[in-house]
Image (tube, rainbow, N blue to C red):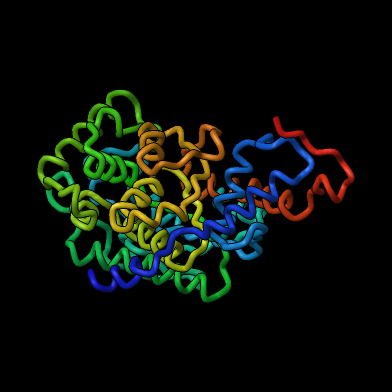
């Protein structure tokens, strides 16, 4: 299965520098002072390089919500019980979750993928790619086998490939799984050599006492499993989650297909760190939608070398921040296609000094 991942990551090409340069020239020709649109201009240049055109547009956009359960929930690390995962799954499938609402507003579709929920679901809209019924308790042993982690990554790759084949032009990462902030913090610690004190956050809103215990659980998981930071599959198998591994594959699949992938929050950030460790060139295709209120997310973005578009204090997950950033991407697309140039508007440009 390693060779299968290498087959995906091998074709990941760098962004098109010429398209990015053409985007810079166009931005500088528009009726505004150079650089006056700030991060929107940087985003326009990045998207141009990714999509190989200075005027990209993304008519078909897809949110992929990967869902799985976590055995570490038995340690009491979440404010919500594990059965909420399956209950929320049906909420997503019926269109009632926050990301469904925001996706409708942004003209995006939502795909819900069961990659490891600890129950058997049935629904006509469900994409069933279950690798196993939840992970094991990582505080007592590996979350899953190496083979299962590899399989989960490849599930994500195939979901990305299927979406692109169906016409998707931009992907947004989403997730659902009670306990997944614990696994994400452990991945951050393992891959970047950080202490749990700076990586572990409140997740679903736990109190101070439970936060201290959650830190201890992550410390124990790292001590018991000794994940190898030089081997991202080892990290995913020992302290990861099935949906996190799936999202890592989704990111790699998007990069291989040369389409942008919008990262949501903390859990998506953990998946992105794993994708970067597998294929560093994949970061060129990642767009950071927002900085989460979850402790550790800013550190993740720094490790990825990405700057978030939004800072709204979000900590819901699901892909909500990712979908909200689509409005900024639409704004960039319209600026690049509809805004007048100095020449076309008959406006005098700035003189060089």
Q: How many marks?
A: 0
Whether residue 203 is situated above or below residue 87 in the rendered picture: above
Quadrant the N terminus occupies: bottom left
Whether residue 210 is situated above or below residue 280 in the rendered picture: above
Give percent across and percent down for residue 137. 19, 49
- In the rendered image, the residue lying farthest to the bottom is 165
**Can residue 137 be seen in the rendering of this structure?**
no
Relative to 350, is 317 on the left or the right? left
Whether residue 72 is situated above or below residue 129 in the rendered picture: above
Give percent across and percent down for residue 162. 47, 74
| 96 vs 283, nearest the viewer | 283
The quarter holding residue 342 reads top right
Quadrant the C terminus occupies: top right
| 175 vs 17, nearest the viewer | 17
Give percent across and percent down for residue 263. 47, 49
Give percent across and percent down for residue 301. 41, 39
| 259 vs 184, nearest the viewer | 259
**Can residue 163 be seen in the rendering of this structure?**
yes
Residue under the point 60% across and 46% down: 324
| 257 vs 92, nearest the viewer | 257
Residue under the point 73% across and 52% down: 334
Residue under the point 85% across and 38% down: 348
Residue under the point 38% across and 69% down: 11
- In the rendered image, the residue lying farthest to the right is 346
The quarter holding residue 191 reads top left
Relative to 107, is 11 on the left or the right? left
Relative to 323, is 274 on the left or the right? left
- In the rendered image, the residue lying farthest to the top is 208
């Amino acid at each position: 299965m390693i060779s299968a991942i290498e087959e995906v990551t091998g074709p990941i090409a760098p962004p098109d520098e010429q398209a990015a340069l053409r985007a810079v020239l166009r931005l500088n020709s528009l009726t505004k002072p150079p650089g006056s649109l700030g991060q929107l201009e940087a985003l326009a240049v990045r998207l141009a390089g990714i999509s190989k055109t200075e005027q990209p547009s993304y008519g078909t956009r897809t949110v992929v919500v990967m869902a799985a359960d976590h055995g570490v929930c038995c340690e009491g690390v979440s404010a919500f019980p594990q059965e909420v995962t399956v209950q929320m799954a049906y909420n997503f499938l019926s269109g009632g979750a926050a990301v469904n609402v925001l996706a409708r507003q942004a003209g995006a579709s939502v795909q819900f993928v069961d990659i490891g929920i600890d129950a058997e679901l049935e629904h006509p809209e469900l994409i069933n790619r279950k690798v196993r019924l939840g992970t094991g308790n990582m505080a007592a042993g590996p979350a899953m086998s190496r083979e299962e982690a590899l399989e989960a990554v490849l599930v994500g790759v195939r979901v990305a490939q299927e979406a692109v084949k169906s016409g998707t032009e931009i992907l947004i990462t989403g997730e659902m799984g009670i306990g997944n902030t614990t696994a994400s913090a452990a991945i951050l610690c393992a891959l970047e050599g950080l202490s749990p004190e700076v990586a572990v956050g409140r997740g679903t809103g736990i109190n101070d006492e439970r936060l201290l215990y959650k830190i201890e659980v992550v410390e124990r998981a790292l001590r018991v499993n000794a994940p190898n930071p030089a081997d991202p599959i080892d990290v995913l198998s020992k302290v990861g989650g099935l949906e996190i591994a799936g999202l890592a594959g989704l990111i790699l699949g998007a990069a291989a297909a040369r389409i942008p992938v919008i990262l949501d929050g903390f859990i998506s950030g953990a998946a992105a760190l794993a994708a970067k460790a597998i294929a560093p060139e994949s970061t060129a295709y990642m767009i950071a939608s927002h900085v989460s209120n979850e402790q550790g997310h800013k550190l993740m973005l720094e490790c990825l070398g990405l700057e978030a578009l939004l800072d709204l204090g979000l900590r819901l997950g699901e892909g909500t921040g990712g979908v909200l950033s689509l409005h900024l991407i639409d704004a960039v697309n319209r600026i690049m296609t509809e805004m007048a140039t100095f020449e076309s508007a008959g406006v005098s440009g700035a003189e060089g000094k």
